[in-house]
Image: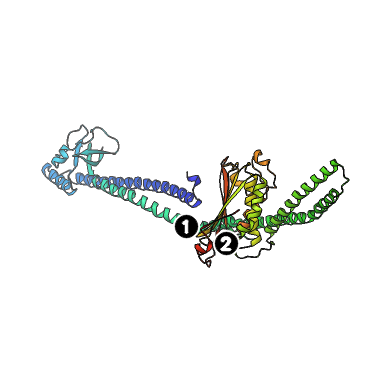
Amino acid sequence: MIAHRSISLRLTTWFSSVLFAGLVLFGAIMWFNLDHTLTSSRSRTLERRVDRLLDLLRDTASDAPADRVRKFQAFADATGGGLIEVFHTDGSRALPSPTAAARAFPWPPIGPLTADRFSEVTFQSQPYRVLVHPVSSQAIIVCLAAPLEANRQLLGTFSVGLLWSIPAVLAVSALGGYALSRKALKPVDQITAATRSISVSNLSDRLPVPETRDELQRLSETCNAMLARLESAVTEIKRFTGDASHELRNPVSFVRTTAELALRNRHIDPASRQAFEGIVAECGKANQLLKDMLTLARADTGSSQLAFEPVDLAEIVRAAAPKARLLAQDRGHSLVGSVDDARPAMVLGDYSALNRLLLILLDNAAKYTPAPGTIRLTLEAAEQVRLTVADNGIGISPADLPHIFERFYRADPSRGQVEGSGLGLSIALWIANVHQASISVDSAENRGSAFTVAFPLLASAPRRDQSAAGGALARVG
């Protein structure tokens, strides 16, 4: 799941994981070091007490037994607990136990020893550090114990501090790391947004170049160099398409004119007449294709001449109604249309281009609707001006739907049988785009399609009186 997240989140996750592992390792090392330090300190304290006790035993060696026991008792009391014993090597006490606690303390087994021995025992539910120190010169064994409870409490406090500090440090570091990574990667978001906004129509735009002298600056400069090469290549292709379309129109027109002149000869044989008629028909298709290619080439280069002015789409629909009716009747369809007269459908646009958009959608509906079919044309004006051309034809498959506005795109073979160059919807999309309109398709296979173009409504358009308009709906055709 992390692989699909943003780089900032992934960097923060990786950084937090490494930091967490480092903090845990650091805490463990510090805990063991503190434990070792405290234990070593307690061991040195016991060793110093042993040295002082041995000095006492040497100093009192010639004293009376009662005086020696008294001084031993005072030394034991001074140690703060009195956990001291002096044994013979056979395990018997060389001196009486100074306290009842020392007498009851679970001392390690006593025997001939050759070196000091540290151990830990539990007495009355408390841990103790025990030192067994043999004194071979006096044939005695000195045993001392010191409590470890303070060490355990200190370690517990330190552990609680680690358990609270590690998550706190981790949270602060994660938030700070995420903020820093977002700030460091902000140029990437800017580059991404700029890249998404660049298309074939604005290849002259360039990415922002951050003056950071790092990988991001080199990335932006490399992308800009690539865009420059793409712009040069696309410009050459557009120029070639426009020039080729323009230059081919004259030969095609010449061939068509020649064929039409030949058809005027009354003495031409039937086979030649049929051939010339085919030439005229194909030249007409080729001429239309060249016109469409030239239109798109001019659109790509931004050299199309469109005159924008306030236009009432209702007038365009009514003006196109006779031609649209003939187009539908030629293919055996009926045309049903309605125009909402409650409010004028005023848009800012080019009259000829909008008329062409309407005819393209009507022609497309007529082509892909088996006869007899029904084509519905609807114009509504509310917050937007919505022009809809719907049919009950063969529809569009979900696989083809995302590609229908691509140039020269033809759908499955059943749709490929329909005549056409595959440029009509591309031109319709271009006309919609230059008019700041959106074009959408609602289609299902064998149930028909509905193309809707939504134009922004001119705010200055006044509301039309319904009574003066002669009703809310006016039939087209």
Of 74 and 327, nearer the camera is 327
Query: What residue is pinned by disc 2?
Result: 210
> Which of the two discs, 1 and 2, labels the residue nearer the N terminus?
1
Dot label at residue 180:
1
- Identified by mark 1, the residue type is Leu
Real-space CA distance between mark 1 and mark 2, rounded to the nearest whole angstrom: 17 Å
Asked whether 53 or 129 is in front, the reply is: 129
Pick whichever, 249 or 144, lies toward us: 249
Asked whether, in this view, residue 408 is left or right of residue 196, the answer is: right
Q: Is residue 92 left or right of residue 116?
A: left
Percent x, y of residue 177:
45, 55
Is residue 405 visible in the rendered structure shown here?
A: yes
Q: Residue at x 77, y 54 (%)?
A: 244
Q: Position of residue 358 (x, y in %)?
A: 62, 54
Q: Is residue 339 left or right of residue 126?
A: right
Occupied quadrant, residue 456: bottom right
